[in-house]
Image (cartoon, rainbow, N blue to C red):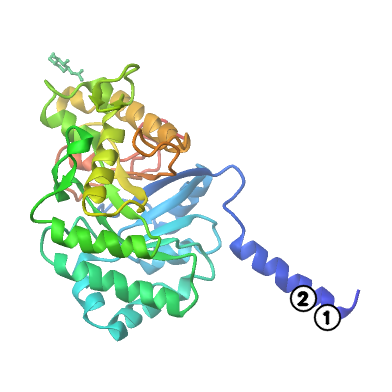
């Protein structure tokens, strides 16, 4: 074989390794890497844990360079957030968005898959809501200009953007959010980008345990609990997602996928609602539901990505259940076994 050919092959092989699919056997589930703790392991060790437990995806709330450096070549897909404080700057001009991108994303894209950049977390309907769409557009335009066709820009919302969600077909954006959400969802649809939603059946159950059944919140019910027209629901998770699908449909958006950016169940902090057993049950069932690719009753067979909240118990969060969402203690031992 001629030398040129060998060289070409070598280069090809290199390219293959960089863009090859995730490690054989890795689980198509994500975990949120929250960092609000003063006793967490260094990022390099955290990423080793993701590898050891075959966790295929990670969500970062902001582009911490030490974490991104640790992720180089590790074949873990990254859902990369921006800090909420950076949203006005990202929205202010294409040049400012480029400067952010060149510092926080461009140096890493050859060494990892970053399928989605999310502008802010749970911002709508609060401060900076009006900057979300222009910031998404500025980032999406950079991705297009640089030929990064496998990447998209989006944002992360939570059920507060809905004015109603029960039954799912009543799902509608709230009057504070509908203006922002309509424009954002239409834009996402035009770009084939998903919307990221944080969904916690635990919260609905903990707020109203007399009306929300535990088995409905935990994916353990074996019969339909809620009937809604022709559709029936055995779990609150599906019902929550379908409320979002209905709300989008009502503003004329029928083709935006949902990614679940956060879901989880605390293992302590609020009496018998928060035990290791309940947390393990929820997170295992959540994972199996995501991996089943069953979609929801309204969107059967849709691929819905999911990220568990969170990797660690975080001791700088408000006291109580907020500190106990972790799959692992800061000393890297499991709180309970999910993987
Ligand atoms: C928690 O304890 C109360 C009072 O004993 C009981 O009624 C309830 O069913 C328990 N909840 C769970 C989830 O175990």
Residue 127 in the image, given as x and y percentages of width and height: 10, 64
Residue 330 in the image, given as x and y percentages of width and height: 33, 45
Above or below — where is 81 with respect to 28? below
Which residue is pictured at 44% across the width and 80% down the height?
Answer: 145
Viewer-proximal residue, 224 or 313?
Answer: 224
Q: Mark 1 points at which residue?
A: 4
**Any part of residue 163 in sight:** yes
Which residue is pictured at 40% across the width and 65% down the height?
Answer: 152
Secondary structure at numbered mark 2: helix
Are the residues at dot 1 and dot 2 in contact (C-beta closer than 8 Å)? yes
Above or below — where is 87 with respect to 218? below
Looking at the figure, which quarter contains the N terminus?
Answer: bottom right
Which residue is pictured at 30% across the width and 83% down the height?
Answer: 94
Viewer-proximal residue, 122 or 25?
Answer: 122
Disc ID at residue 142: none
Q: Mark 2 points at which residue?
A: 8
């Amino acid at each position: 074989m001629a030398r040129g050919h060998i060289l070409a092959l070598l280069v090809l092989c290199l390219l293959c390794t960089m863009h090859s699919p995730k490690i054989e056997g890795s689980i198509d589930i994500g975990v949120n890497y929250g960092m609000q703790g003063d006793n967490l392991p260094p990022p390099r060790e955290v990423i080793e844990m993701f590898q050891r437990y075959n966790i295929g995806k990670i969500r970062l709330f902001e582009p911490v360079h030490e974490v991104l450096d640790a992720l180089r070549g590790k074949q873990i897909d990254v859902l990369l957030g921006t800090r909420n404080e950076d949203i006005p700057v990202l929205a202010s001009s294409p040049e400012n968005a480029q400067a952010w991108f060149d510092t926080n994303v461009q140096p890493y894209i050859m060494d990892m898959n970053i399928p989605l950049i999310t502008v802010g977390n749970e911002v709508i309907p609060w401060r900076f809501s009006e900057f979300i769409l222009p910031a998404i557009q500025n980032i999406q335009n950079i991705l297009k200009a640089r030929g990064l066709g496998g990447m998209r820009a989006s944002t992360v919302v939570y059920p507060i953007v809905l004015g109603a969600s029960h039954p799912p077909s009543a799902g509608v954006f709230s009057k504070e959010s509908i203006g922002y959400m309509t424009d954002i969802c239409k834009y996402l649809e035009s770009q084939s980008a998903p919307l990221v939603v944080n969904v916690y059946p635990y919260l609905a159950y903990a707020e109203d345990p007399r009306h929300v059944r535990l088995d409905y919140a935990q994916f353990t019910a074996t019969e339909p609990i809620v009937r809604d027209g022709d559709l029936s629901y055995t779990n609150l998770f599906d019902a929550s997602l379908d409320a979002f699908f209905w709300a989008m449909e009502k503003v004329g958006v029928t083709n935006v996928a949902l990614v679940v950016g956060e879901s989880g169940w605390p293992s302590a902090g609020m009496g018998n609602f928060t035990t290791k057993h309940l947390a393990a049950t929820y997170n295992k069932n959540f994972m199996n539901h995501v991996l089943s690719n069953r979609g929801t009753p309204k969107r059967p067979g849709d691929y819905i990505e999911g990220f568990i909240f969170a990797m660690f118990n975080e001791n700088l969060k408000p006291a109580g259940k907020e500190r106990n969402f972790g799959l692992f203690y800061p000393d890297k031992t499991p709180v309970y076994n999910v993987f």
